[in-house]
Amino acid sequence: MSIFKSHFWYNKSQRNGIFLLVLLIIVFQSIIVFVDFSSDVMVSTETPKVLAFQHKIDSLRKVEIENRKPKITPFNPNYITDFKGEQLGMSLEEIDRLLAFRKTSKFINSKKEFQQITKVSDSLLDKISPHFKFPDWVVQKNQNKYSNQNVISSGVEESRKPKYKLTTNDINKATAQDFQTINGIGPAFSKRIIKYRSKLQGFSFQNQLYEVWGLEKQVADSVLETFKIFDKPKIKTQNINTITFKQLLKNPYIDYELCKKIFNYRDEVAEIQNISELKNIKGFPLDKYDRIVLYLVAE
């Protein structure tokens, strides 16, 4: 009994405090249970302040939604991927038509051709076509074609005088301005042709023009209709038996691996007697032989 007595024995002030605490708990619980705190007062949402605040929230929401939309940067429609096409709103069938067309090694050169190939709707074409970015020569070609169509449709045929008179028809002597008289050749491509011509020390074969990086075959065909090789260039040759590795690597048709093979072969035979022996090297590109030997002799 002494144990229980020690736990439940309180003096008068303590018992009064406990009684007051219990009373307060009962009162607060009763208030929560029985008192209705709801209000019947209706707050109008049509007041000018509320409407202005709601309008501001809606405007901010629209701005945020617009910012989250993926931005469309200029792109070449010939290189649309599955992911890119889906982002633009194209269907799988439309994307597949484009990819099947590109597998034929052909290119789309206008938004009209894009619609003909993919069969996209007019609304989607109007949405994405402003972002199409074609090469400069394609744009120039389309502009010339459009101008010609306008002349024919109006029934007006004018004898056109060339804006620039060619200085030569020799492809190894032609200037950048000479090349720019060909449709599809602008300042960039004319400089690229001349730079590659310098690297080769001059064109020895007309089909070397097709090796110019980025030059379309149909444009190169147009160039070769006007410009020909009249005199073969005088190319500085080097002795295959004394040339250094670094010097041989400067040959425009020899890469690092082929250079190693040629030097290994030269070490095996001690001396190359005839330049045609290069054909005996395993893995030698026979299709490039006539170009490679333009710069080499066996002495």
Image (cartoon, rainbow, N blue to C red):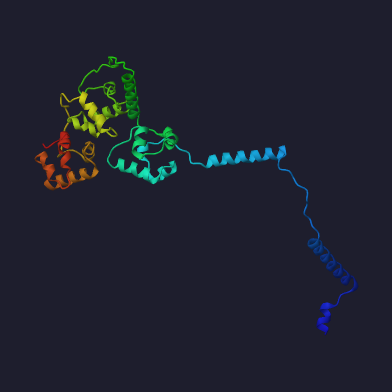
Left or right: 237 in relation to 72: left
Give the residue at the far left of this rendering.
Answer: 273
- Give the residue furthest to the bottom: 1
For the point 29% across and 21% down, which residue is it? 177
Residue found at the very far right of the displayed protein: 12
Q: Is residue 15 above or below residue 83?
A: below
User: Residue 88, can we see it?
Assistant: yes
Q: Can you say whether 293 is above or below 228 in the image? A: below
Q: Provide residue 92's location: percent of width, then percent of height.
A: 38, 46
**Is 209 positioned to the left or the right of 298 in the image?**
right
Q: Quadrant of residue 168?
A: top left
Q: Quadrant of residue 62?
A: top right
Which of the pair 210/261 is nearer the observer?
Answer: 210
Name the residue: 23% across, 26% down. 223
Res 171 seen here: no
Between 30 and 244, the one lying in front of the other is 30
Q: Nearer the viewer, residue 174 or 53?
A: 53
From the image, which quarter does the N terminus lie in?
A: bottom right
Instruction: State the image coordinates of residue 142 (x, y, percent, origin top left).
Output: 34, 27
Which of the 4 image quadrants contains residue 188? top left
Q: Quadrant of the C terminus?
A: top left
Residue at 35 percent of width and 45 percent of height: 96
Residue drawn 26% across the image and 21% down it: 178
User: Which sits in the foreground, 76 or 39?
Assistant: 39
Number of on-image labels: 0
Coordinates of residue 21 in the picture (x, y in percent): 84, 67
**Whole-percent x, y for residue 95 in the image:** 37, 43
